[in-house]
Image (tube, rainbow, N blue to C red):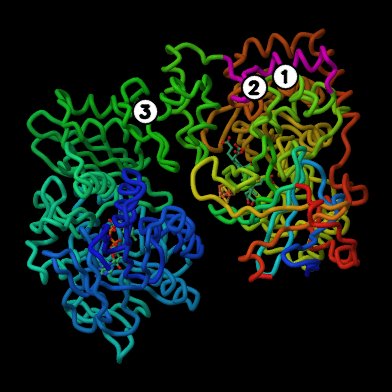
C-alpha cells in the first residue's frame, strides 16, 4: 500500500530506492507502475508491456527510452510512445520533492488506487 | 445518426485489416467496427498455438485496447447485425437499433460446416473455430478425455496435434482414403500419416461417421458396419461455410460467398465484402494472406481511390504442427510432375508443371526453397526441366529471391525490407539489419538467409565492418583501441567519449562485455548497462519470474546437493524442477526477491545459465565406468568447467567431453569439445546443434588431457578477445579461419601470452551469487512494494509550485 499525501500525489519511494539507470515496479491499487531513475530525470510507465506483459521495470534504459526485457520493444520514457512496433504504454508524471519520489495520479490510477 | 462513415460488419482478421487499411489512407474517416464476438479482433490462425501452450486467448488479440481509442475507431463488441438495407447502407442490430452509414463492408467470415450426421447436436461435440473451443478441448484433456476429430484436413490435423500435445488419446476420422486430400497427392499423404502417428495421433481413413452416439452427451462415434469408437469429446472440422445470410436477405448476389468483383464491390453499390465471406472469381478463400490484399483494394474502393484491383491469390498453406514440416502451394497434381522422395529421412518434394509453367508444389519433411517456389508459382514462371528446378530450389540463393519473398516468418519480414534497411537505413551488417527489421529475432531459423541477402547486397563480398552498434558506427576493434588508449573503465566513460555520445541501449551490454574483457574484469561495473539477467544473475521468464540453475561440474552431483535443491524448490515454490539439456537442474518460476535466499539455501555456485559466459561442460561416464571408455571424460570435463567457470565470453560457450568416439556427450556439436580416441584426444571447436547444426572442426589431436585443457583454454581466451558480441564460436571459427586459429593458439609464444591474460582475468572472477550477502544496491532484488515500511513514515510536503520534474 502507498500513502497519499495531497490529492493526486502518491509517495512511492525515496530517491535512493531506485539505482541510477534502473527501474523498479510499484503497486498502485491493482495496477503495476514502473518507476525509472535516469540521468535526465525520473519517469513512470505502466509496468506491463503491451506485447506480452513483459515487466518494463526490468528493461534496459538508454536515450530516454526503455527496452522491454522479453522481446526488446522500446518505449519513450516521457510519453510511453512505442518506438518499435505495436501499441504505446501509459505514462505517468513523477514529481520529486526532497528525498521523496511521487507519482502524480492520473484519474485512471486514482480509480485503481 | 446521420449517414456518415463506414461500417465494418465483422471483427475478424478481415474486419481488422480493412479497418487498418482505411485508417492508413484517411486519418479522419469515421469508422465503426462491429464485432459479433464479445472480444476485440484476434488472430484466429494462431488458435492451435494457444491450444498447445495454454496461453490466455487474450494473447492472440491483434491490437491492444488503446489502439482503437488512439485511432478513433468506434468498436462495438458482442453486437450482431441482424439486417442490412443495401440501398441506404443502414444496419439494424439485434435488439432493434438502426444506424445509417455512407458505406458498409461485409467481413462476416464463415462458420464451421456441420455435416448432416445424426447426433451432432449432442453435448461434447464442438467445432474448432474460436478460443472457446480451445478452452473446451483443454478442459476435456485435463480430465483425460478420449477425443475424436472428424476431418483429416489441415485444421483437423492441427486440432488433433493440439489434443495430442495435452497428452490425450486422439483419433482422426477421415472420410477419404488419404489425409489432406485437397492439398496433397497420395505420395505425400502416405508420408504425412506416419509423421502424425508418431505424434500420438491415431488415423482412421475411409471412415464415414453415421452417428454420434450417447444419451444427450456424446460417448462415441458409430461407423458403417456398426463399428464403434469411444470418445468423450468430438471435434468436427470438415470445412467452412461463408456467412452470407445478411447479404442474401438484403438482396445481394451470393453463391458460395458474397459475390465481389475485382474492386471488392458486391452487387450493391454501397457495399463491399472482404475475407472468408466473399467469393471472388469463383473462389472463396479460407486463408489469411488473400485478406490483406483484398482489404487494401476494398479500402481504395470505399474511399474512391482509383487504380487498384484484386486479381486473386495463390493458395498456399503451411501445416502448423510441431515436427511435421509441410508446405503445399497451388495445385497438387498436374500434367507434368517432378518428385523426389526419401523414405528414410523422410522427405517428399514435388513440383507440378502445367503447360510448361510452375503451377504447384508440395514440400514435406524438407521445405528448403519454399520462398523460391512460391515465387515461381505465383508468377507462373516457365519451367523447362521440373526436376532440375526442384533441385535448384533446394539450394536457391538469396540472389534469386524476389524482393517480395518473405524471409522471416516470425516477424513477417520480406527480402525487400532487408534490402531497404541497408540502402536507406544505413545498415551495413547482418546484425544491424536484424536489429532494425527484427528479422531473425524470432526462432532464428532464417538467419542464414538474412546473412546471405546482406552479403549479396554488399556486392557478394564480405560484410561491411560489423559496427558494434548501429548508433556508434564504430567497430569492436576501434572501440577496443580507444578503451585501451584512454583507459576507460566503465560503459558510461565509453559512451561519453566515443560515437555520438548517445547510447541506444542495443549496444550497452556489448560495451559492458568489451570493457570488462579489456580491463581483465577489473573494470567499474555499471549494472544499468546490463540486461536484467546480468543484474540479478538469473534468467527472466515469460511471466517475469526467474530461473535458477546452479553449477554441477561436468553434470556430476551428490545426494546432498539434490537434497538442498529439493528443499529450496519446495520452500520457495518453484513452479517446476527440470533436468536441463545441459546436464544440470533448473528451478523455474522463482520470484526475483527470493533469489538471494534460494542461492543461500542451495549453497552451490552460479551456473551462469543466464549469461553470455561459460555454461556447461557435458561429460559422459568415460573410463570410470564405461566398458568402451578410452579417456577419463568426467575428470577432464570437471577440470575444464572449474578452470573456466565465471568467465564471460562474447556469446555463450557450451562444451562437452566424450570418453570415446561413440561420443555420448555430443562433443562434436559443442562450441568446444574433446573426444578421447585410441591413445589421444581430439580437440574440436565451432560445433553447433541449436538453431543451426555444424560439426565442430578438429583443432588438434593431443596426447593427454592436460594438453587438451591448456590448448582449449588458450582458444577460449583468443575468442574472448576477438569474438564479436553475440558471435558464437560456430560463427567465429569460420570467420577467422581454422588455419589462422591453429597458427595462433598452437604457437608457443602467443599461446603463453594468451594463457597469461586468461589467468589475470580469471583471478578477478567471483561467484555472482555471493551478491546475496553483498548486493550492489540495497534494492538489487526488490521492487518498491518491498519498501513499504519506509513509505509509511510521515513526510513533509513542500509547496506545490516547488514541484520539479
Ligand atoms: C534450460 C534449457 C532447456 C532445458 O530445459 O533443457 C535452455 C533454456 C533456454 N535456452 Fe537453450 N536451453 C538449454 C539448453 C540448450 C541446448 C543444449 C545444450 O546446451 O546442450 C542448446 C543447443 C546448443 C547451443 O547452444 O547451440 C540450446 C540452444 C539455445 C539457443 C540457440 C543458440 C544458437 O545459436 O543456435 C538459444 C537462443 C540464443 O542463445 O539466442 C537458447 C536460449 C535459451 C533461453 C535462455 C531463452 C531465453 O533467452 O530466455 C531459455 C531459457 C528458458 C527459461 O525460461 O529459463 N538456447 N539450449 C537448457 C539449459 C542448459 C543448461 O543447463 O544451461
Ligand atoms: C484453427 C484455425 C487455424 C487456421 N490456420 C490458418 C493458417 O495457418 N493459415 C491461413 O492462411 N489461414 C488459417 N486459418 C483460416 C483463417 O483463420 C481465416 O481465413 C480468417 O481468420 C478469416 O477471417 P475473416 O475475418 O474473413 O472471418 P472470421 O474470422 O470468421 O471473422 C468474421 C467475424 O465476423 C463476425 N460476424 C459474422 N456475422 C456477423 C454479424 N452479422 N454481425 C456482427 N458480426 C458478425 C463473426 O463473429 C466473426 O468474429 C485458420 C483457421 C482456423 C479456425
Ligand atoms: S527452452 Fe530453448 S527450445 Fe525451449 S522454448 Fe525456450 S529457447 Fe526454445
Ligand atoms: S513482452 Fe515486451 S516486447 Fe514482448
Dot 1 or dot 3: first in sequence order is 3
Badge 2: residue crowd in 10 Å (few <14, some 14–19, many ≥20): some
Residue that appears at 87% across and 18% down: B756
Q: Are marks 3 and 2 on the same chain?
A: yes
Please report contact status of discs 1 and 3: CB closer than 8 Å, yes or no. no
- Name the quarter showing ligand 1: top right
* Outermost residue toward the right in this view: B773
Q: Is residue A42 left or right of residue B39?
A: right
Q: Which residue is mark 2?
A: B472
Q: CA distance from mark 1 to mark 3?
A: 33 Å
**Does residue B176 belong to the magenta stretch?**
no
Q: How many marks?
A: 3
Q: Is residue B306 left or right of residue B786?
A: left
Q: Which residue is mark 1?
A: B498
Please report contact status of discs 2 and 1: CB closer than 8 Å, yes or no. yes
Q: Which residues are magenta?
A: B465-488
Say what secondary structure mark 3 lies in: helix
Q: Position of residue B574 (x, y in %)?
A: 72, 63
Residue that appears at 80% across and 61% down: A11
Q: Which residue is mark 3?
A: B416
Amino acid at each position: 500500500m502507498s500513502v497519499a499525501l495531497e490529492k493526486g500525489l502518491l509517495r512511492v519511494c525515496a530517491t535512493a530506492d531506485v539505482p541510477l539507470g534502473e527501474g523498479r515496479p510499484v503497486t498502485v491499487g491493482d495496477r503495476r507502475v514502473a518507476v525509472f531513475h535516469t540521468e535526465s530525470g525520473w519517469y513512470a510507465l505502466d509496468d506491463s508491456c503491451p506485447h506480452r506483459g513483459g515487466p518494463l521495470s526490468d528493461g534496459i534504459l538508454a536515450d530516454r527510452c526503455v527496452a522491454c526485457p522479453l522481446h526488446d520493444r522500446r518505449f519513450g520514457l516521457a510519453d510511453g510512445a512505442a518506438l518499435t512496433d505495436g501499441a504505446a504504454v501509459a505514462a505517468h508524471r513523477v514529481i520529486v520533492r526532497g528525498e521523496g519520489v511521487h507519482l502524480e495520479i492520473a484519474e485512471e490510477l486514482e480509480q485503481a488506487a | 445518426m446521420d449517414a456518415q462513415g463506414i461500417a465494418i460488419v465483422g471483427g475478424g482478421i478481415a474486419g481488422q485489416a480493412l479497418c487498418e487499411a482505411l485508417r492508413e489512407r484517411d486519418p479522419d474517416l469515421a469508422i465503426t467496427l462491429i464485432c459479433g464476438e464479445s472480444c476485440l479482433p484476434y488472430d484466429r490462425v494462431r488458435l492451435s498455438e494457444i491450444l498447445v501452450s495454454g496461453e490466455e486467448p487474450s494473447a492472440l488479440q491483434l491490437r491492444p485496447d488503446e489502439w482503437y481509442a488512439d485511432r478513433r475507431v468506434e468498436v462495438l463488441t458482442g453486437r450482431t447485425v441482424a439486417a442490412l438495407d443495401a440501398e441506404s447502407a443502414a444496419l439494424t442490430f439485434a435488439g432493434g437499433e438502426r444506424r445509417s452509414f455512407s458505406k458498409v463492408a461485409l467481413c462476416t467470415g464463415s462458420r464451421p460446416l456441420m455435416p448432416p450426421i445424426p447426433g451432432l447436436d449432442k453435448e461434447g461435440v464442438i467445432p474448432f473455430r474460436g478460443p472457446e473451443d480451445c478452452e473446451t478441448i483443454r478442459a476435456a484433456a485435463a480430465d483425460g478425455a478420449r477425443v475424436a476429430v472428424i476431418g483429416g484436413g489441415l485444421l483437423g490435423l492441427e486440432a488433433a496435434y493440439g489434443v495430442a500435445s495435452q497428452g490425450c488419446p486422439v483419433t482422426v476420422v477421415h472420410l477419404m482414403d488419404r489425409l489432406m486430400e485437397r492439398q496433397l497427392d497420395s505420395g505425400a499423404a502416405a508420408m504425412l500419416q506416419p509423421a502424425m502417428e508418431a505424434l500420438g495421433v491415431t488415423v482412421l481413413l475411409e471412415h464415414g461417421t453415421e452417428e454420434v452416439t450417447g444419451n444427450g452427451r456424446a460417448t462415441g462415434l458409430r461407423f458403417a458396419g456398426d463399428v464403434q469408437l469411444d470418445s468423450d469429446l468430438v471435434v468436427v472440422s470438415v470445412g467452412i461455410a461463408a456467412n452470407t445470410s445478411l447479404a442474401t436477405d438484403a438482396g445481394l448476389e451470393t453463391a458460395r460467398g458474397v459475390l465481389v468483383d475485382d474492386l471488392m464491390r458486391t452487387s450493391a453499390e454501397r457495399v463491399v465484402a472482404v475475407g472468408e465471406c466473399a467469393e471472388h472469381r469463383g473462389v472463396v478463400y479460407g486463408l489469411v494472406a488473400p485478406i490483406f490484399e483484398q482489404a487494401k483494394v476494398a479500402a481504395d474502393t470505399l474511399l474512391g481511390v482509383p487504380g487498384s484491383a484484386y486479381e486473386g491469390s495463390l493458395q498456399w498453406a503451411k501445416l502448423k504442427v510441431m515436427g511435421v514440416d509441410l508446405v503445399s502451394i497451388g495445385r497438387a497434381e498436374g500434367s507434368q510432375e517432378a518428385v523426389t522422395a526419401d523414405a528414410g529421412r523422410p522427405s517428399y518434394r514435388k513440383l507440378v508443371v502445367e503447360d510448361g509453367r510452375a503451377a504447384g508444389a508440395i514440400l514435406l519433411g524438407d521445405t528448403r526453397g519454399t520462398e523460391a517456389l512460391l515465387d515461381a508459382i505465383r508468377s507462373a514462371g516457365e519451367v523447362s526441366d521440373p526436376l532440375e528446378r526442384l533441385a535448384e530450389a533446394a539450394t536457391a540463393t538469396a540472389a534469386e529471391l524476389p524482393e517480395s519473398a518473405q524471409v522471416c516468418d516470425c516477424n513477417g519480414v520480406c527480402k525487400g525490407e532487408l534490402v531497404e534497411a541497408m540502402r536507406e537505413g544505413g545498415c551495413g551488417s547482418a546484425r544491424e539489419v536484424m536489429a532494425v527489421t527484427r528479422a531473425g529475432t524470432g526462432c532464428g531459423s532464417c538467419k542464414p538467409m538474412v546473412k546471405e541477402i546482406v552479403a549479396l547486397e554488399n556486392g557478394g563480398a564480405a560484410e561491411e565492418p560489423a559496427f558494434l552498434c548501429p548508433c556508434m558506427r564504430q567497430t569492436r576493434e576501434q572501440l577496443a583501441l580507444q578503451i585501451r588508449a584512454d583507459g576507460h573503465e566503465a560503459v558510461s566513460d565509453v559512451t561519453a567519449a566515443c560515437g555520438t555520445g548517445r547510447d541506444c541501449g542495443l549496444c550497452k551490454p556489448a560495451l559492458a562485455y568489451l570493457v570488462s574483457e579489456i580491463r581483465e574484469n577489473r573494470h567499474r561495473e555499471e549494472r544499468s548497462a546490463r540486461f536484467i539477467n546480468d543484474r540479478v544473475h538469473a534468467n527472466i521468464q515469460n511471466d517475469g519470474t526467474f530461473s535458477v540453475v546452479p553449477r554441477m561440474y561436468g553434470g556430476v552431483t551428490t545426494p546432498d546437493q539434490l537434497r538442498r535443491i529439493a528443499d529450496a524448490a519446495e520452500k520457495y515454490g518453484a513452479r517446476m524442477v527440470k533436468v536441463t539439456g545441459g546436464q544440470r537442474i533448473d528451478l523455474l518460476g522463482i520470484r526475483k526477491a527470493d533469489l538471494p535466499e534460494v542461492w543461500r539455501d542451495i549453497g552451490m555456485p552460479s551456473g551462469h545459465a543466464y549469461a553470455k559466459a561459460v555454461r556447461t561442460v557435458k561429460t559422459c561416464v568415460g573410463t570410470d565406468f564405461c566398458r568402451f571408455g578410452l579417456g577419463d571424460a568426467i575428470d577432464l570435463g570437471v577440470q575444464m568447467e572449474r578452470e573456466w567457470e565465471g568467465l564471460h565470453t562474447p556469446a555463450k560457450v557450451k562444451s562437452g567431453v566424450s570418453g570415446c568416439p561413440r561420443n555420448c556427450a555430443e562433443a562434436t556439436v559443442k562450441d568446444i569439445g574433446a573426444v578421447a580416441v585410441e591413445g589421444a584426444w581430439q580437440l574440436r571447436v565451432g560445433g553447433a546443434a541449436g538453431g543451426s547444426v555444424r560439426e565442430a572442426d578438429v583443432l588438434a589431436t593431443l596426447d593427454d588431457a592436460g594438453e587438451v585443457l591448456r590448448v582449449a583454454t588458450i582458444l577460449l581466451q583468443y575468442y574472448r578477445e576477438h569474438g564479436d558480441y553475440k558471435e558464437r564460436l560456430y560463427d567465429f571459427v569460420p570467420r577467422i579461419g581454422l588455419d589462422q586459429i591453429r597458427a595462433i593458439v598452437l604457437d608457443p609464444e602467443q599461446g603463453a601470452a594468451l594463457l597469461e591474460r586468461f589467468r589475470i582475468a580469471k583471478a578477478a572472477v567471483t561467484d555472482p551469487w555471493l551478491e546475496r550477502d553483498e548486493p550492489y544496491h540495497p534494492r538489487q532484488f526488490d521492487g518498491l512494494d518491498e519498501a513499504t515500511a519506509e513509505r509509511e513514515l510521515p513526510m513533509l510536503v513542500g509547496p506545490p509550485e516547488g514541484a520539479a520534474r
